[in-house]
Amino acid sequence: MNGLALLIPIALLLGMAGLVAFFWCLRSGQFEDLDGAAMRILIDEDKPDAPA
C-alpha cells in the first residue's frame, strides 16, 4: 500500500507534464506543417550532368 501512495502521485505528475509539453508544442507551432518534411525529400535540387 505504501508503494501505491508513492507511485500514483508520480504517475499523475508525469501525465500532467506530458500534457503540458503537448500543449506547449501545439501552441508554438510544432504541428503546423506535417507534410513539409515528407515533400522536401522529393525535391531534386541537384543539377543534372551535361551530356558529353
Image (cartoon, rainbow, N blue to C red):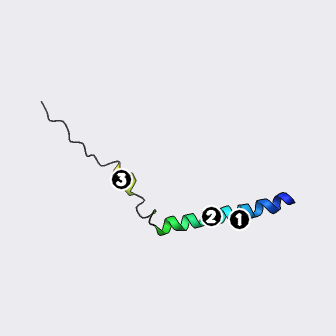
Q: Nearer the viewer, residue 4 or 49?
A: 4
Do tag 2 and tag 3 residues touch (Cβ < 8 Å)? Answer: no
Q: Is residue 27 above or below residue 39?
A: below
Q: Amino acid at mark 1?
A: Leu
Residue 9: image location, x then y, percent: 75, 64
Between marks 2 and 1, how big is the CA–CA gap? 9 Å
Task: Report the residue marked by disc 2.
Answer: 17
Give the mark nearest the N terminus, 2 or 3: 2
What is the residue that sits farthest to the left in this orientation?
52
Between marks 2 and 3, how big is the CA–CA gap? 32 Å
Q: Amino acid at mark 3?
A: Met
Task: Report the residue marked by disc 1.
Answer: 12
Q: Residue at x 14, y 33 (%)?
A: 51
Question: Which quadrant does the C terminus fall into?
Answer: top left
Residue 28: image location, x then y, percent: 46, 67
> Image quarter for residue 7?
bottom right
Q: Which mark is drawn over residue 39? A: 3
Label 3 crowd (10 A; few <14 / some 14-19 / many >=20): few
Disc 3 element:
helix
Give the mark nearest the N terminus, 1 or 3: 1
| Image side of residue 48 versus residue 22, left or right | left
Residue 38: image location, x then y, percent: 39, 52
